Image: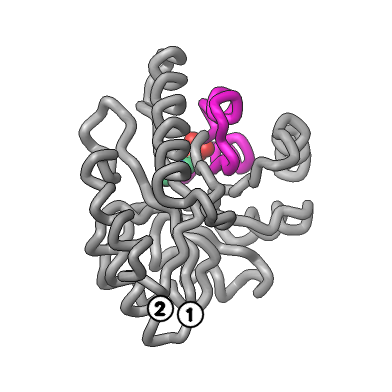
Amino acid sequence: MSIAEKLLQIKTSLPGYVCLVAVSKNQPAPAILEAYAAGQIVFGENRVQELISKRTLLPADIHWHMIGHLQTNKVKLLIPFIELIHSVDSEKLAAEINRQAALMHKKVNCLIQFYIATEDSKFGFDFEESLPFFHNYINGKYPFIRISGIMGMASFSDNYQLVRSEFKNLRGIYNRLKNDYFKNDDQFKEVSMGMSSDYKIAVDEGSTMVRIGTSIFGSRF
Ligand SMILES: *Cc1c(COP(=O)(O)O)cnc(C)c1O
């Protein structure tokens, strides 16, 4: 199947309200262009350097999402163009995004990443630990970031019950935050969860944004 056919197949299997982020990390510019030509506008990358060098080769109206762990010293490179940062995994990083965004007179869309898996190699806030940060945010400490939802990655496992329970947990975190901090904030609406192997479960459990690479582009080089 071509990239266009795979995209179409995935698109038709998703409810209309779910945003498909085509994860193009490790894929060359021509593959991305093929997806773009088939109508895909939103692409996700996990490395700043790779994103910046590929971006110059590709159409300017692509919406770029940062989905991987972000070091504070790379933040300023993204601010001028990034549409959404999925991977805000510490208050320190949020503060740096806010600081750089202020310098560039921008407001940057962010998702707060939660740690929901059983593996210990993944980044993200723990629910209890995140509360002081949300408290600071709603009290106006970070006026140059806009928190538009949360993100998480399930365990890398073929135990679907485990994966489902992790997604359920993330959706539950979203619901609590929405109720406690964002009741009157219509911008807080995204739950970014689900990848090639588990996006159907994620959508079942209330995902609004799936990040899919391999099922669109094939395996990475
Ligand atoms: C690579 C990656 C994906 C996509 O993974 P696939 O299995 O190729 O669909 C999604 N989210 C994050 C954070 C990633 O790093």
Give the structural element (helix, strand or loop) at label 2. Answer: helix
The quadrant the N terminus occupies is top right
Lower sequence index among marks 1 and 2 = 2
Depth order, front residue of 128/2: 128
Image height of 70 relative to 221, above or below: below
Residue 199, percent across and down?
A: 56, 30
The type of residue carrying mark 2 is Ala
- Report if residue 208 lies within the magenta region: yes
- Please provide the residue range marked out in magenta: 195-221
> Which quarter of the figure has residue 90?
bottom left
Tell me the residue that label 1 is attached to.
Answer: 106
- Asked if the residues shown at circle 1 and circle 2 are in contact, with their CB atoms under 8 angstroms apart, the answer is yes
The amino acid type found where label 1 is placed reads Lys
Q: Return the x and y of residue 193 as percentages of the image width and height.
A: 49, 37
- Residue at image position (53%, 56%) is 185
Residue 160 lies left or right of residue 8; in this view the side is left
Q: Residues within 10 Å of mark 2 (few under 14, many from 20)?
A: many
Q: Position of residue 9 (x, y in %)?
A: 75, 33
Q: Between residues 15 and 76, which one lies in front from this camera angle?
A: 15
Q: Secondary structure at mark 1?
A: loop
Please name the residue shown 51% across and 69% down the image: 82
Q: Is residue 209 located in the magenta-colored stretch of the structure?
A: yes
